[in-house]
Each structure stands twice: as structure tokens, then as C-alpha cells.
């Protein structure tokens, strides 16, 4: 038989900003683990020639957060090959409207389109019926893929190649084992489009046994944790190192509860000793310091930053969200343990629990600034994400929620609050960023960093990004990148094209004003850094957050009143990867 080609175009969609324009950067900030995982699995299918010895499977991959999607060119390549499909992968709820718009364009070209990711998986997992947006995709002829793909892509490719693809592939009740699973990997030219010139991601484990009501992980990846082995992780690191990539975001929702954590970290320590350069960003829980040797080994393995799901410091709020594993009286001890290893700490903080008020939130943030040695604090709206228990409960009760999935990015109000109006809640969110990132507190954070041996330049750079993201670029810092690319024709179809006479003058002003804003903020924070470094007493600095604290001393009065209501259990934070 004559040889033929089956071409696959993998796209990780971005989403729209408040004016309807695609959020895309010259360099994006976070790598996509979903894109890497799907690419690795399909590359394995190509190597094994699952469509037969006469079929060459070719794959292209791109992340729309840093790459323009040329739908016409992609369609032409698939038509030239004669067969293939477009895969919209890792689609979160806030990215689903953009994914559906792309799907319409490709379906208009007569191409097969598959959509997978947390939105499809979460809805199929938790809801009694398909919501309207998934039904709309089906009406377009889009294939929906729910669940994980290890060991299953061969069947999907065969079905598509024969023209016999099913409308839904639902593997939500059949989660694969991760031992010896195919490594997530992307080509070098894709990875280099992430800030830093080489920043990849992988999951060393999936799933979480806990019950946080706002979390989608437990309902998409399951409550039974599954893990890669140390051999698997070494293979992933070596494969990336071979293409010049040595910075990794480990996307486990809680790496500290990975049963293989010690073997994995020991292997990474050995690799570093042999000359393999490794830098890690880990996600951990607030009780990781209770595991003997974990923090010390993480630092030796190359961890220089951790994300911690602090979520809230009010036990009443945590208990209401079933986040009972967070023990606010141990936060300071945990943060100090990371600082002792010169590791920068990031923490996520959720605004809008049912008992929150503007006054209580302001009080809590001031308490954090004073009593907890956190470097970077980022804020999110409490959001009923599709796939979470919160969303299912509101959906079944018929409670009003924003119908526009584009707003489910944790930085928009999507449902009502019992004590705050929408306008007040939005102002509380904006005020939280202003309140934490004051010049005075930025200096405090830098003084703590210098005293504890954490790189002041790195801390100042990250403080600049998180302080300016919302105020200067209008997006959450986790959506930021380097140099925004905004195209007039890349706008939500329902909003229509703007006149060039309106779009381009405004865009010129945006470019000039954002550049000035970033320049001013960078200069101001680095001036503070230089002042701190020039202080001859800088190593003698101390404050309340750096002092050891007993359980009672660590508790503010309002927290102490509720502390005895929180059961002492372990758990995991909200994942950066799902935000």
C-alpha cells in the first residue's frame, strides 16, 4: 500500500480579556502540562505506528497563550495530508468559549475536531446532563473527550481515521495507572516560547483524597492518588535536559503527599550532583513541614519556589469549604521552614467565602502581612468551577450563575455573595492587591528575603509582576506574559470587529501606558531593593513573622475563637495548574 500521512494539530486555547480580545503574549508565564502530556502520548502512537506501518502520524503543537493560531494554514496542512484532526487540549472552563470559537472555524473547513480538558471532564463527571455549551459543541459535530488518555489514544486515532469516531469518549470512571506512563514532552521550539527560554512541566502524581468543595481536581482526576516512579521522573527530566530545558513546574496538586516524594527527590539530587541542572516549582500543602526531611530534600533537589494553598486564615471559612486540613496556627512554622532553605513562598488566597466581609478581609490581609512571612500572595474570587461540588450544588438548586464560561477564571464574580454585592466584592478584590503590595510591605518582604538568604533580585522581580498584573495589564498575574500581542481580528465574534480608527489609536496608547507603568513599578521596587541591600544592619532585621511562635501566640483573637472547631487532618491546596 502507498504511504500516507495522518496529521494532528494540537492547540491549547487561551481565553478572552474583558474587551473580548485573545490573551496572548510574546512569551507566556506558565507551561501547559496538558499540551505536553497529550503530545507525548501521540508521539508514542506515531512511533508505534498505531494506524498501520504505511501511515506516518505527524504532530504539531502550540499554546495560544504565546502563539498565534493560523486556522487557515492548519486546515491546509491537514487537507494536504489527507487525514487527521484538530485537538483542543487541556481546555479549562474559562478557555472553553475560545475553544468553541476555534472549533467552529475548523468545522467550517470540514475538519474533525476533538475538545478535551477540565471543562468537559468536570461537567461529565458532576452534572446529570450535558450543559448547553457542550450540547452546542456536539451540534457542531465536535467530539468530546473526558478523562485521561494514557493507553487510549490508539483507539481514538483509529476511529477518526476510519470515519467512525463516537460523539463522546468518556473515561471518567476508568483512571489509568501512572507507573511507566508515557512522559509529557514538547519540542524545544514550543517550550522556548515560555518565559525564561526553557520552562516545562510534568505531573509526578494525580488525584487527591480530600473533599474541598471548590476544587475540581478530586472530581476530574479522582480521589485515589496515582503516582509516577522515580525512574519515570528521571526519564522526563533527562528528556527535557536533552533539548536544553531544566526548569520544571511540577503540577501535582500536592507533591508533599506523593508517596514517592522521597525516592523522586533523591533521584533529582543525584542528577544534580552528576551535573544536570534542575530548578523546580512545587505545589505543597500547609503541613508539608511535618514530613521529616521533605523541605530539606526538596531544596537540595532544586526547588527554589513553592506554591502553597493557604486559601484563607479564618477557620470558619475553611470549615465551610471542607478545607479542614489547613491549620492556621502552623502556617508560620511551615513558612519559616521553607525560608530556612532559601526557598521563595507563594500563597493563594480566596476572597468571598460566605462569612467574608470587606472588613474581615482587610483585617485578615493585615494579619498575614504582620504575622506570616509569605513572599508572594495572590488573590482569587471564590468561584463555582464546573467540576466542583460547589458548582454542582448551585446548578442543581437552580441558583443563578454567570452563563459566560469565559469569566470562570477566578478573577471575576460569577455568582452572588450572601454579604456583599457584586460591586463591593469586585472592589474588595482590587483592594486586596493594593493592600498587600504597598511599598511599605514590599520593603518588609525584601528585608525578610535578604536576612534569610533568598535572592533579593528574584523576589523584587516577582513582586513587580504580581503587584502590577491586575493594575497595569488588567489580568491576574498567572495570566501574564512578556509583551502582549493583541490583534484586531482576534475578538469574540459576538462583540464584532472594532473600527481600525478606534482600535489602533487605543492600542498605541495601551502599549505606551503599560510600558510606562511597568518601567515605573520596576524602578520603584528595585530602588527599595537597593536601599535594603545598602543597609549595614540588614542581616539583623526581624519582625513578628520571623519569630518562633507557639500555637497560642500564633493565633490572632478572631482565629483563636474558632480554632477548636477545625479537625486535625492533612490535605492539599488549590492547584495553580487548574487556575
Image (cartoon, helix red, strand yellow):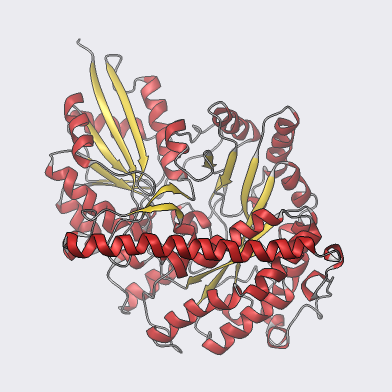
| Closer-to-camera residue (506/182) | 506
Please state, as top left, top right, bottom left or bottom right, where the N terminus lies in the image. top left
Q: How many marks?
A: 0
| Closer-to-camera residue (104/50) | 104
Rendered position, 480 above or below 211: above
User: Residue at position x 80%, y 74% from top?
Assistant: 543
User: Residue at position x 55%, y 51% from top?
Assistant: 224
State which quadrant residue 187 falls in: top left
Left or right of 36 in this view: 394: left
Image location of residue 102, percent across then percent down: 23, 49
Q: Is residue 259 visible?
A: yes
State which quadrant residue 133 falls in: bottom left
Image location of residue 318, percent across then percent down: 59, 75
Rendered position, 267 above or below 399: above
Left or right of 263 in this view: 388: left
- The furthest residue to the top: 1
Left or right of 283 in this view: 69: left
| Closer-to-camera residue (565/281) | 281
Image location of residue 453, percent across then percent down: 78, 55
Q: Is residue 164 visible?
A: no
| Closer-to-camera residue (254/436) | 436
State which quadrant residue 315 falls in: bottom right
User: Residue at position x 43%, y 86% from top?
Assistant: 424
Image location of residue 460, percent across then percent down: 64, 60
Left or right of 378 in this view: 271: right
Rendered position, 3 above or below 276: above
Amino acid at each position: 500500500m502507498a504511504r500516507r500521512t495522518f496529521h494532528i494539530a494540537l492547540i491549547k486555547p487561551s481565553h478572552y480579556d474583558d474587551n473580548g480580545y485573545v490573551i496572548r503574549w510574546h512569551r507566556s508565564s506558565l507551561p501547559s502540562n496538558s499540551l505536553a502530556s497529550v503530545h507525548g502520548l501521540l508521539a508514542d502512537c506515531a512511533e508505534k505506528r498505531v494506524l498501520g506501518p504505511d501511515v506516518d502520524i505527524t504532530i504539531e503543537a502550540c499554546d495560544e497563550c504565546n502563539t498565534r493560531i493560523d486556522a487557515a494554514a492548519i486546515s491546509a496542512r491537514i487537507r494536504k495530508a489527507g487525514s487527521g484532526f484538530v485537538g483542543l487540549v487541556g481546555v479549562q472552563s474559562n478557555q472553553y468559549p475560545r475553544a468553541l470559537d476555534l472549533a467552529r472555524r475548523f468545522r467550517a473547513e470540514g475538519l474533525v475536531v476533538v475538545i478535551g480538558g477540565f471543562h468537559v471532564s468536570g461537567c461529565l463527571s458532576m452534572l446529570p446532563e450535558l450543559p448547553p455549551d457542550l450540547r452546542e459543541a456536539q451540534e457542531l459535530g465536535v467530539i468530546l473527550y473526558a478523562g485521561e488518555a494514557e493507553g487510549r489514544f490508539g483507539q481514538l486515532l483509529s476511529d477518526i481515521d476510519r470515519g467512525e469516531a463516537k460523539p463522546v469518549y468518556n473515561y471518567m470512571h476508568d483512571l489509568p495507572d501512572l507507573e511507566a506512563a508515557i512522559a509529557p514532552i514538547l519540542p524545544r521550539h514550543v517550550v522556548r516560547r515560555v518565559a525564561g527560554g526553557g520552562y516545562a512541566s510534568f505531573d509526578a502524581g494525580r488525584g487527591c483524597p480530600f473533599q474541598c468543595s471548590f476544587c475540581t481536581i478530586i472530581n476530574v482526576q479522582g480521589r485515589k492518588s496515582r503516582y509516577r516512579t522515580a525512574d519515570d521522573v528521571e526519564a522526563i527530566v533527562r528528556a527535557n535536559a536533552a533539548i536544553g530545558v531544566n526548569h520544571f513546574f511540577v503540577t501535582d496538586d500536592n507533591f508533599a503527599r506523593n508517596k514517592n516524594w522521597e525516592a523522586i527527590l533523591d533521584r533529582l539530587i543525584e542528577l544534580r550532583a552528576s551535573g544536570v541542572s534542575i530548578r523546580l516549582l512545587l505545589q505543597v500543602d500547609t503541613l508539608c513541614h511535618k514530613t521529616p526531611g521533605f523541605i530539606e530534600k526538596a531544596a537540595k533537589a532544586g526547588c527554589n519556589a513553592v506554591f502553597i494553598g493557604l486559601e484563607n486564615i479564618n477557620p470558619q471559612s475553611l470549615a465551610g469549604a471542607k478545607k479542614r486540613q489547613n491549620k492556621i496556627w502552623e502556617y508560620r512554622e511551615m513558612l519559616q521552614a521553607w525560608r530556612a532553605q532559601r526557598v521563595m513562598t507563594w500563597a493563594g488566597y480566596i476572597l468571598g467565602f460566605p462569612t467574608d466581609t470587606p472588613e474581615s478581609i482587610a483585617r485578615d490581609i493585615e494579619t498575614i502581612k504582620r504575622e506570616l512571612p509569605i513572599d508572594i500572595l495572590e488573590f482569587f474570587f471564590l468561584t463555582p468551577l464546573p467540576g466542583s461540588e460547589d458548582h454542582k450544588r448551585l446548578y442543581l438548586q437552580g441558583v443563578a450563575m454567570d452563563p459566560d464560561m469565559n469569566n470562570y477564571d477566578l478573577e471575576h464574580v460569577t455568582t452572588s455573595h450572601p454579604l456583599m454585592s457584586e460591586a463591593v466584592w469586585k472592589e474588595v478584590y482590587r483592594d486586596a492587591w493594593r493592600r498587600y503590595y504597598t511599598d511599605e510591605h514590599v520593603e518588609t518582604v525584601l528585608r525578610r528575603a535578604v536576612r534569610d538568604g533568598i535572592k533579593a533580585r528574584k523576589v523584587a522581580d516577582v513582586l513587580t509582576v504580581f503587584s502590577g498584573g491586575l493594575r497595569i495589564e488588567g489580568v491576574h498575574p498567572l495570566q501574564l506574559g512578556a509583551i502582549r500581542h493583541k490583534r484586531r481580528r482576534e475578538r469574540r465574534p459576538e462583540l464584532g470587529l472594532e473600527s481600525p480608527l478606534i482600535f489602533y489609536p487605543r492600542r498605541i496608547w495601551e502599549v505606551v501606558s503599560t510600558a510606562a507603568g511597568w518601567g515605573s513599578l520596576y524602578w520603584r521596587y528595585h530602588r527599595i531593593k537597593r536601599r535594603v541591600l545598602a543597609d549595614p544592619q540588614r542581616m539583623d532585621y526581624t519582625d513578628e513573622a520571623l519569630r518562633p511562635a507557639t500555637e497560642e501566640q500564633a493565633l490572632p483573637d478572631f482565629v483563636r475563637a474558632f480554632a477548636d472547631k477545625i479537625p486535625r487532618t492533612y490535605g492539599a491546596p488549590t492547584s495553580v495548574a487548574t487556575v
